[in-house]
Image: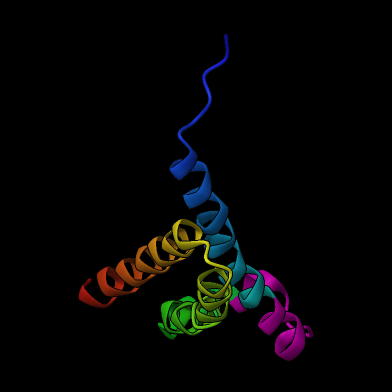
Amino acid sequence: MSEQPPKNKSKIREGFLPGIIFPIIIFFVIYIVQYKEVSFWDYMQSMWQFQLMFKLLSLCVVPNLILFLYYFKQKKDMAARGVLMATFIYAFMVLISSIL
């Protein structure tokens, strides 16, 4: 007998995983569109040196709003909660980085 995860957990995961992955994809798209002539590692080092990494990451989370609204309109409340949870994780990362 294999144990199935509770339905709510799998629905939360349906929104959580895209909520985590979507900002990372946006981050790479920004790099490719604007800074493709610079190597990725040089780009990351300069972002870290000028303390812009988490500021840019916080802007990359904004499109999660579209994902959240999509799930909300589709009446997938648990998936929308998953997106919200992922967004809060990014928010806490930015908050902690600004404190340190």
Q: Position of residue 21 (x, y in %)?
A: 59, 62
Q: Residue 84: which quarter of the image?
A: bottom left
Nearer to the camera, 28 or 45: 28
Q: In the rendered structure, which segment of residues is drawn in magenta?
A: 29-43
Which residue is farthest right?
37
Q: Position of residue 69 (x, y in %)?
A: 52, 78
Which residue is farthest left?
99
Which residue is farthest bottom?
34
Nearer to the camera, 5 or 17: 5
Q: Position of residue 91 (x, y in %)?
A: 34, 72
Q: Residue 50: which quarter of the image?
A: bottom left
Q: State the scheme by which the image is colored.
A: rainbow
Q: Position of residue 99 (x, y in %)?
A: 20, 74
Image quadrant where one finds the C terminus: bottom left
Q: For the point 72% across and 91% down, which residue is it?
A: 34
Q: Is residue 59 above or below residue 15?
A: below
Q: Is residue 89 left or right of residue 13?
A: left
Residue 42, magenta (yes or no): yes
Q: Is residue 56 above or below residue 87?
A: below
Q: Is residue 50 left or right of residue 33?
A: left
What secondary structure is the magenta-colored segment mainly?
helix
Q: Is residue 98 left or right of residue 15?
A: left
Q: For the point 57% across and 8% down, which residue is it?
A: 1
Q: Is residue 91 left or right of residue 4?
A: left
Q: For the point 45% across and 62% down, which residue is it?
A: 77
Q: Is residue 93 above or below residue 8?
A: below
Q: For the point 57% across and 14% down, which residue is it?
A: 2
Residue 10, magenta (yes or no): no
